[in-house]
Image: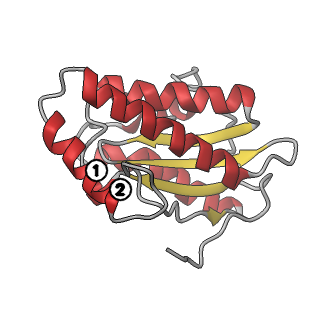
Amino acid sequence: MATRYRFGESHVPHFITTSVINWVDALSRPLYKDIIISALTYCIEKKNLVVHAWVIMNNHIHLIISAKNDAPLADIVRDFKKHTAKELLEAIDTSGESRRNWMIWLFSSAGKKNSNNERYQFWQQDNHPVMLTSDKEIQQKIDYIHDNPVRAGIVYKAEEYKYSSAYDYYTQQPGLLPIDMLI
């Protein structure tokens, strides 16, 4: 699907949202969130990804990211999504997931409707990348990301949510993922 949103200069921070197809709450278990953390860590260490802020919700991920060494940000995100889709589908299939049959059927049905997939589709195709060019935009997106679990009623304070960079920003302590703070 064509979109007017494109990645700009890779060294400039971008706000992206990566959503599970049909907004299915397929990331509700810690095991699945840990797969995302592991993949992001790998991309930071091996693919020149820079993560500035992040949150993993039950059906989507928000990130503010950029890249070092002229690494193409779009390619890093593409590879991240491809890898995590495979890992998450395998975990859903083998972890005793109570919704396994329904979820696999749903991802298979979506995959059959999209010629870009071989078999399954886990993530929606678009990331809706927005290049952040001012401190005001950056602060607004960081606040939006960190307030997601609060708005969802999961926690009272943003820094209480384990799967977010809010802990890093509010406590000045390292969280689950190495980040490069912007503000």
Q: Residue furthest right?
A: 69
Tags 1 and 2 touching, CB below 8 Å: yes
> Which amino acid does the dot numbered 1 rest on?
Ser
Residue 70 to residue 172: above or below: below
Q: Which residue is drawn at 12% across and 29% down?
A: 98
Query: Which residue is nearer to you in this view: 96 or 156?
Result: 96
Total labels: the figure holds 2
Left or right placement of residue 86 versus residue 157 in this view: right
Q: Helix, strand, or loop for circle 2?
A: helix
Please say whether residue 52 is visible from this viewpoint. Answer: yes
Residue 15 to residue 33: above or below: below
Spatial CA span between label 1 and label 2: 5 Å
Residue 73 to residue 1: above or below: above
Query: Which residue is nearer to you in this view: 64 or 169?
Result: 64
Left or right placement of residue 69 versus residue 131 in this view: right
Category of crowding for the residue at label 2, using alpha-carbon neighbours closer than 10 angstroms: few (below 14), some (14–19), many (at least 20): some
Category of crowding for the residue at label 1, using alpha-carbon neighbours closer than 10 angstroms: few (below 14), some (14–19), many (at least 20): some
> Which amino acid does the dot numbered 2 rest on?
Gly
- Return the x and y of residue 59 as percentages of the image width and height: 31, 47
Please say whether residue 144 is visible from this viewpoint. Answer: no
Residue 9 occupies quadrant: bottom right
- Return the x and y of residue 161 as percentages of the image width and height: 36, 31
Q: Residue at x 28, y 55 (%)?
A: 23
- Return the x and y of residue 158 as percentages of the image width and height: 39, 38
Q: Which mark is residue 108?
A: 1
Q: Residue 87 carries which label?
A: none
Q: Helix, strand, or loop for circle 1?
A: helix
Q: Residue at x 33, y 59 (%)?
A: 112
Q: Name the residue under label 2.
A: 111
In which quadrant is the C terminus drawn? top right
- Return the x and y of residue 16 as percentages of the image width and height: 54, 56
